[in-house]
Amino acid sequence: MINGFVMLANKINGSPWAFPTAESVRESFCLAWQWEDTDGFLVNHFGHPYQGSFYLSAGRVNGFGFYESLFFSALGSFTWEVFGESNRSSINDAITTIAGSLSLGEISYRLFMEAFATGVPLPLALLINPIAGFHYLVTGWKPPNTGKNLYEFQVYLGTGYAQTNYSVSSEQQEIFSFKGPFADIGFKAVYGNPFDQDTWIPFRHFELSFAFGLNPGNYQDFRISSDGYLFSFSPIYTNKTSMSTGLSLHLDFVFLGKAEIYDSTINNYSNALNWTIKYEYLYSQYTALQIKSHSGLTFWGSSKYYSLDTYEKEFNNYGFGFNTKNFISLEKNKKDRLELGILFYALWTYPETVVFSRGTVFWVFTELTYIHFITDHISLGITGSYAGEWGAFNGFPDTRKQNKAVKLLVAWNL
């Protein structure tokens, strides 16, 4: 059913590959699957994980656990590659769909349960998880009432000014530049107490942030960052100090720079298994220090090192590597908060996956935010950020991509 809806949407959109035939199905069963990576970065690394989240959600709403529902993600991805499109079946598309479904599927399922338990209107709950909402409408199923688990929730509107540069170093050729304003919208959800987690239940605690900025036709800034414990324990819990630590699953996505439908300037995708530490120290009743640190293996990542109008722009670079994501915040009187985030990713491309596959790509993202609460729920903020991507591929010129931005925010906080 899920694949049927996606096929219908693709046919309405007029996609040339959205018309499977008997011959294309036969080839999918008889021929070796290909390494097909010529789709746009947005399609491959947001569209596929989002579609995969539908499959995992189908398992969850029918009573299966997190790991059991992985079967539904694999089955859904396989049937889509074979029956859902006329292109020859793609190995990397299937992997991206399955890997990305775990985080997005479980997070959206738990947020749907939270929305249902708190009486969020059904149309909004449907946006959170269409499969769970559809299942509720058709069967009368009601999600388990696990109580109110949102530890923190914020939705914001903002406006800012950005400067982006993309150049080929050896040729001193500027590919893209932008200086100008943009509008921004986003939200952040923290599910479960980050500092008191002793569980083997996957995603009993997770954090998700979503941001989308746009200057129509010129610039975009689309980011998703998530982490969820697969298991965790709390070795420290006192009146002043609390800490949780454990293995976490991450899905991160950055699509930043030139406003094109399928490709952007700075592109980053990462599925990772990290070891996580989340620590809070209360200096007093009114002052708190929080540290959240993740480091580990990016087991399935991707870049589009030569994007837009440069060399071999049609290829995505898949690979493995390591990442570290570190966040620190200081809050005083529950009125003022200073937050700093520093993220670093290194990716080595899988050999022979594209014509220039032997290479290394690095990213760094930093963000400094000051927040002031003017009421219990309304806050104002200012954020400065930097994003950079660089690397090296043998036989091809190096590039330099960077983005600097500052933005003002008004937010509603739960």
Image (cartoon, grey):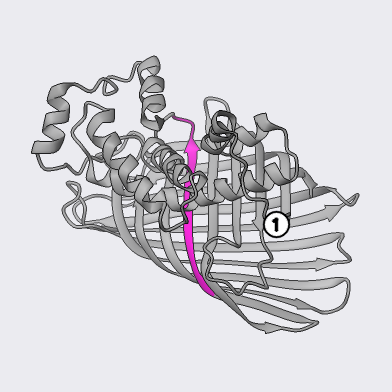
Q: Which region is colored magenta? A: 246-260
Q: Position of residue 97 (x, y in %)?
A: 36, 45
Q: Position of residue 8 (x, y in %)?
A: 38, 20
Q: Position of residue 122 (x, y in %)?
A: 67, 32
Quarter-wise, where is residue 331 in the image? bottom right
Q: Nearer the viewer, residue 411 or 228?
A: 228
Tag 1, which secondary structure?
loop
Could you tell whether 23 is left or right of 347 in the image?
A: left
Q: Counting other residues with Cα less than 10 Å from the Cα at mark 1, is it few (<14), some (14-19), or many (20 or more)?
A: some
Q: Quadrant of the N terminus?
A: top left
Q: Residue at x 37, y 46 (%)?
A: 72
The answer, for residue 168, to whether it is visible in the render is no
Count of numbered circles in the view: 1
Q: Nearer the viewer, residue 43 or 193?
A: 193
Q: Where 372 falls versus 81 (above or below)? A: below
Q: Position of residue 190 (x, y in %)?
A: 66, 57
Residue that numbered label 1 is attached to: 149
Q: Where 253 falls versus 16 (above or below)? A: below
Q: Residue at x 74, y 81 (%)?
A: 241
Q: Is residue 259 magenta?
A: yes
